[in-house]
Amino acid sequence: MDALLHSNREPEPHETTVLLAMMNTERDSINTLDTRIHQLELDAELARQRIQRLTAQLEAETRGLRLYEDAISGLQNTRNALGQSVERKQAIMSSRRRVPGEIWRKIFLLLWGSEFQQRDEYKRPFSVALQVGAVCREWRDLAQTTTRLWSILDYTFSPKERVKSRRDNKLDHYLDRIGTATPYIILRKACSLRLPDVLCQVTTATELIIMLKHPDLQSEPQLTFPLSTPVFSHLRTLSISSHRYITQIVSDLLHPFPSLDTLYLLNMEFHWLQPIVPHINLKTLSIEGTWERPHSWTNVAIDIAMVAEQFSNLTALALDCDWKISRPQVILHHVEFLTIRSSAITNVHGLTLAVSFPNLIEIMNIGNNIKGLAPIVQAWGENVEALSLSGIEPYDGSSQDLPEILGDSGKLPQLSELYFLNTAKIDLALVADAVVRRNDLVADGEATNSEAELSPIETITLPIICNSDPNLERLQQHVAVILMCVYVLHEQTAG
């Protein structure tokens, strides 16, 4: 049939019969397919109709879902509000509401004590009473009736208060508020040591700080408490500072304070009155100056013989100045803690021959160098267990004395603790060499000298910056090393 279809000849009768039969078969197939297509089109239309109905139903269900979600959110908000209300009511019923006032008062006093111990005399102390009083009415009532929370009298003198009556009226009003049992008194910008008369109400005070500003040196070239000053029989600590001038004070300034055991003086030079009246209760004496400012503190020299005579029971002594001696022999029997500036002492040899500290156990040296320290520790270091070097600079020439001081020379035979304070960097290689040599000799049983057997250095406190020093690991193999930010106030290290 394919050849016939591709030719132009007329088919034969039998071929015509075959072609007709084939055509009839194909027409039957076409009819069958048409029927099937029509049926499928009907089914597709039904499917489209169902989809339209389902789409409409889905949109309706989606709208319903949104309504449910909105209702759930509203109910959750209501539930949260009710939960918060329950918590508030529970708080009202909690045990905290039933804590007795005395317990709260003890807590407030503990907080006050902690804040007071961390106070800075150049900043006003933190007011615990005002802070806790701002929490609620009950705490405010407790704070107002807890006298000790208000027991710091911090008063700043003003040029506008030269009139005595105005100043006393103001102080009297303040004392009426805080009570007369005020253990701590701070007087700022005072022009003299003449205490206001109104302070007779608070002679039970235990600590008095007087910060002089522009002291009236013409009318009182030697500052002293007037004989009319009331007796503060409970006062334990007295601090007097003059930040702009070197001011002389006379040695009888302590007569209003018979129980005083701690005295801090800054830029104050003693003028000794005869006869000397010993103050046997004083345990800590610190006399320091401001070396960084251009004034005459470098010319100040304290007579150690007068110190020993007037304060015979000192256990902690800090003299950050030159020393002089008016007697051939001075013994400070009870001093255990000594703070000096060796580079300021001009007659080290004469001083070490005449002065002795038989019970000294700790020495602190202040300054960027240790000039003169070696003969001092040679004379006074027999029983010293701790040495502190404050402010030393690593490249000062006197640093080369460290091996002699720390080593096996016997200058500090009992030394076990070493501190480097107020310094950013030290020559750790120099320190490590001396300490390792000393401790190795002790370990080998060879650390002896004509006077005493050497003890090993056990702990060294270093600035945190030494953490990256390559000599640190070698040092840690022989001693316990403490790395910390070691900046301290000198007057607080005397004891």
Image: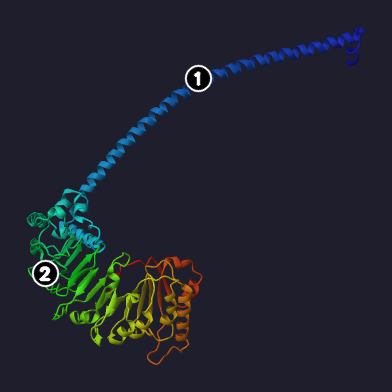
Q: Nearer the viewer, residue 111 or 282?
A: 282
Q: How many marks?
A: 2
Q: Is residue 177 above or below residue 482?
A: above
Q: Is residue 164 left or right of residue 445?
A: left
- Can residue 147 be seen from the camera position used here? yes
SS for dot 2: loop
Q: Which residue is mark 2?
A: 232
Q: Is residue 196 above or below residue 57?
A: below
Q: Is residue 126 left or right of residue 181?
A: right
Packing grade of label 2 (10 A; few <14, some 14-19, many >=20) is: many
Q: Is residue 248 left or right of residue 168?
A: right
Q: Quadrant of the C terminus?
A: bottom left
* Whole-percent x, y for residue 18 in the image: 86, 12
Which numbered tag is attached to residue 53?
Answer: 1
Q: Which residue is outermost to the bottom?
A: 450
Q: Amino acid at mark 2?
A: Phe
Q: Which residue is outermost to the front?
A: 218
Earlier along the polypeptide chain: callout 1 or callout 2? 1
Q: Amino acid at mark 1?
A: Arg
> Which residue lies at the image location 37% right of the left edge and 91% below the top edge?
451
CB contact under 8 Å: marks 1 and 2: no
Q: Nearer the viewer, residue 459 or 187?
A: 187
Mark pair 1, 2: CA separation: 101 Å
Q: Is residue 284 left or right of residue 292?
A: left
To which quarter of the image does residue 46 belong?
top right
* Whole-percent x, y for residue 106 in the image: 19, 61
To which quarter of the image does residue 382 belong?
bottom left
* Whole-percent x, y for residue 241 in the image: 22, 65
Q: Nearer the viewer, residue 72 or 351?
A: 351
Q: Is residue 293 above or below residue 383?
A: above
Packing grade of label 1 (10 A; few <14, some 14-19, many >=20) is: few
Q: Quadrant of the N terminus?
A: top right
